[in-house]
Image (cartoon, rainbow, N blue to C red):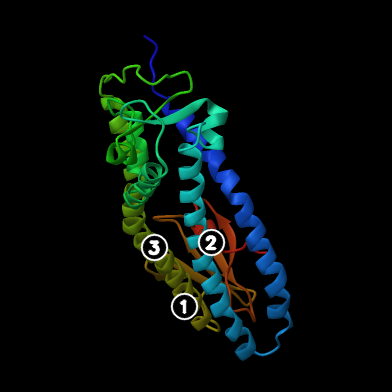
Amino acid sequence: MQNPYANFWRRVAAFLIDNIVLAIPMWMLTGFFYMYYMPQVMLNKTEEEMAAVFPLFFLFTILSNLFFFVLFILYTSIMESSSKQATLGKMALGIKVVDKNGQRLRFWHAVGRNLGKVVSYFIMYFGFFMAAFTRRRQGLHDMMASTFVVNEAYQPGQPLPEEPFRTGCLVSTIAVILLPFVLGIIAVIMIPFLVETANTQTAYVRLLQTQMDALRGEDITQDNPLQINNISFYIQDGDVYAAQTQPEAFTVRLPLGEKHICCVEEEGNFCQLNEIKPCM
């Protein structure tokens, strides 16, 4: 017997189509709002006048999201309880929704099913991904409402059998959901380290510039340099030079009358890492 259940990726494609359909009235509403109120904001001259308008934008954001939620529930529930048993996206992909007996849903049954999707949104869409690995390809909202998404050719009375549990899909789903958290943890660990490293390098350059500026007028030449922390300092034609061979080779110059050093020559990445420009 042919598998009666809708393929997971067909359900995803149908979901995307429905979101585009629902986005059209939202775009129209948002466009009208901003076309009407944005010129008023731009014409306001004082900060007090502009500040008085911003609460309206905040209220609009809340109401528009509420409007989209209500529109979503009505659209999906009316369409899935209709004779087509499917939204426009599901109709385009040749799939439909049935109850546990393979029959068409009643309106309030469809409302309950679609309200159940809210739970999946709050658990990082995991409830939607469940349709990829459960035995009857049910999402969490399908399990809550005892509904099934089947191919258009399915007829009431035909069996809705259990399939093998897809452990690989479950593992993949968990990996996809956890990936942002793993990346976030890595970022939390690495960003302070990188910022500290960048700040250390910047502080090091400032210290080097201060040392070189303080040495102006001293009697130090390239043949008789001043050694400080493996760095050789010397003066030539009024410019102060600092050269290092270990641990990273570089030569920088503080021109006469300038406050910032430039890079004379470099064998490593010192100048690039510290954003020191080449000497002209």
Please name whichever residue, 31 or 261, is drawn nearer the observer in this view of the structure. 31
Task: Please give the name of the residue rendered at 40% of the width and 11% of the height, measured from the top-left corner.
Answer: 2
Task: Identify the mark nearer the N-term, 1 or 2.
Answer: 1
The residue that label 3 is drawn on is 197
Please name whichever residue, 181 or 278, is drawn nearer the observer in this view of the structure. 181
Task: Identify the mark nearer the N-term, 1 or 3.
Answer: 3
In what quadrant of the picture does the C terminus appear?
Answer: bottom right
Please name whichever residue, 23 or 84, is drawn nearer the observer in this view of the structure. 84
Please name whichever residue, 225 or 191, is drawn nearer the observer in this view of the structure. 191
Q: Where is residue 59 shown, x and y percent of the image?
A: 52, 73
Image quarter for residue 42? bottom right
Q: Where is residue 191 shown, x and y percent of the image?
A: 38, 59
In the image, is residue 167 above or below residue 36?
A: above
The disc labelled 3 sits on which kind of residue?
Thr
Q: Distance between the residues labelled 1 and 2?
A: 15 Å
Q: Distance between the residues labelled 2 and 3?
A: 21 Å
Q: Does the rendering let one see residue 11? A: yes
The residue that label 1 is drawn on is 211
**What secondary structure is marked by label 1?**
helix
The residue that label 2 is drawn on is 251
Task: Please give the name of the residue rendered at 63% of the width and 84% of the height, measured from the top-left corner.
Answer: 50
Query: How many residues crowd mark 3 within 10 Å: few (<14), some (14–19), many (20+)?
Result: few
